[in-house]
Amino acid sequence: MRLIVSEPAAELIGERGGRLYVWLTHAKCCGGVTQLASATNAPTGKQFRRVEAAGDLELYVPQGLTRLPDELYVELRRFPRKLESYWNGCAWVV
């Protein structure tokens, strides 16, 4: 898996300990589309495993996730300030 992290996102992740957690969520609208969520702290009630990643970043995905994307993009949204991840360039997982 190729990890592409914008500089602002990498700086924020570094400031918060260098760990990034990415997991799947299901939207309540739109027929339950599967999307990605990401944060520098693990959400409660979920088990994660570490994935080899480039640089100083530690990447964690759900324990039961069997298929990883070819590319995972991570960006920092300005308003509100939060991390956003994209699976193979998309905001949803196919």
Image (cartoon, rainbow, N blue to C red):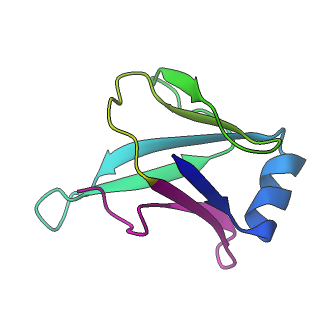
What is the residue that sits farthest to the left in this orientation? 31
Residue at image coords 47%, 20%? 47
Count numbered badges in the picture. 0
Q: Quadrant of residue 34?
A: bottom left
Quadrant of image for the C terminus? bottom left
Residue at image coords 29%, 56%? 93
Residue at image coords 21%, 57%? 28
Residue 94 left/right relative to 91: left
**Rendering coords of residue 75 (x, y %):** 64, 67
What is the residue that sits farthest to the bottom in this orientation? 79
Which portion, as a residue range, is magenta?
71-94
**Rendering coords of residue 24 (x, y %):** 37, 44
Residue at image coords 65%, 63%? 82
Residue 42 left/right relative to 35: right
Q: Is 75 drawn above or below residue 44 in the view shown? A: below
Residue 41 left/right relative to 33: right
What is the residue that sits farthest to the right in this orientation? 15
Is 76 covered by the magenta stretch?
yes
Is 91 covered by the magenta stretch?
yes
| Nearer to me, 15 or 10 | 10
| Nearer to me, 44 or 2 | 2
Q: Is 36 drawn above or below residue 63 in the view shown? A: below
**Rendering coords of residue 45 (x, y %):** 45, 23
